[in-house]
């Protein structure tokens, strides 16, 4: 079981998604599922980063870090897939 934390940038992304209600529900469900299994089916490691993973929800990507030592998942960004999606740091 993982504790979920949300970075300020991800909070801003969620506020933008409030206008797109169907996507928001699916994204919320995906985030809740990360607390149970942070490396479930469909999760991919982001190349070039040590603890960073992504999961696809429709045309959006939830990008997050996993900290096994603290049993914590930090949601970094929630972005619509584009050419610059993974240039978030």
Image (cartoon, grey):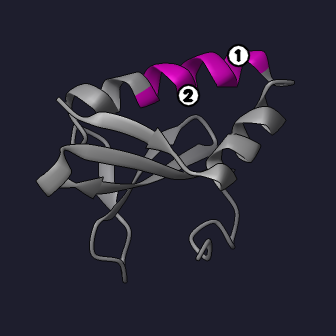
Residue placed most toward the observer, 88 or 12: 12
First in sequence: mark 2 vs mark 1? 1
Residue placed most toward the observer, 58 or 8: 8
Across and down, in percent, residue 29 comes to 46, 19
Residue placed most toward the observer, 48 or 36: 36
In this rendering, position of residue 17 left or right of residue 43: right
Residue at image location 87% in from the left, 24% down from the top: 19
Identify the secondary structure beneath mark 1: helix
Residue at image location 61% in from the left, 77% down from the top: 87
Circle 2 packing at 10 Å, graded few (<14), some (14-19), many (20+), is many
As displayed, is residue 22 above or below residue 7?
above
Please say whether residue 25 is one of the residues in the magenta stretch. yes
Asked if one can make out residue 80 in the rendered structure from this viewpoint, the answer is no
Highlighted range, magenta: 21-31
Across and down, in percent, residue 42 comes to 31, 42
Residue at image location 28% in from the left, 67% down from the top: 51
Which quarter shows the N terminus? top left
Please say whether residue 88 is one of the residues in the magenta stretch. no
Asked if one can make out residue 62 in the rendered structure from this viewpoint, the answer is yes
**Res. 55 image quadrant:** top left
As displayed, is residue 26 above or below residue 15?
above
Alpha-carbon span between mark 2 and mark 1? 9 Å
- To which residue does mark 1 refer? 22
Residue at image location 58% in from the left, 77% down from the top: 89
- To which residue does mark 2 refer? 27
Q: Main secondary structure of the magenta part?
A: helix
In this rendering, position of residue 73 left or right of residue 5: left
Identify the secondary structure beneath mark 2: helix
In this rendering, position of residue 36 left or right of residue 44: left
- Verify CB contact (< 8 Å) between mark 2 and mark 1: no
Residue placed most toward the observer, 35 or 69: 69
């Amino acid at each position: 079981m993982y504790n979920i934390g949300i970075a300020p940038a991800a909070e801003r992304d969620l506020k933008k998604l409030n206008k797109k209600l169907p996507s928001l529900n699916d994204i919320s469900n995906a985030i809740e599922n990360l607390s149970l299994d942070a490396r479930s089916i469909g999760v991919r490691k982001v190349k070039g980063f040590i603890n960073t993973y992504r999961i696809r929800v429709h045309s959006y990507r939830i990008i997050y870090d996993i900290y096994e030592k603290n049993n914590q998942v930090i949601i970094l960004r929630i972005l619509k897939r584009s050419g610059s999606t993974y240039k978030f740091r």
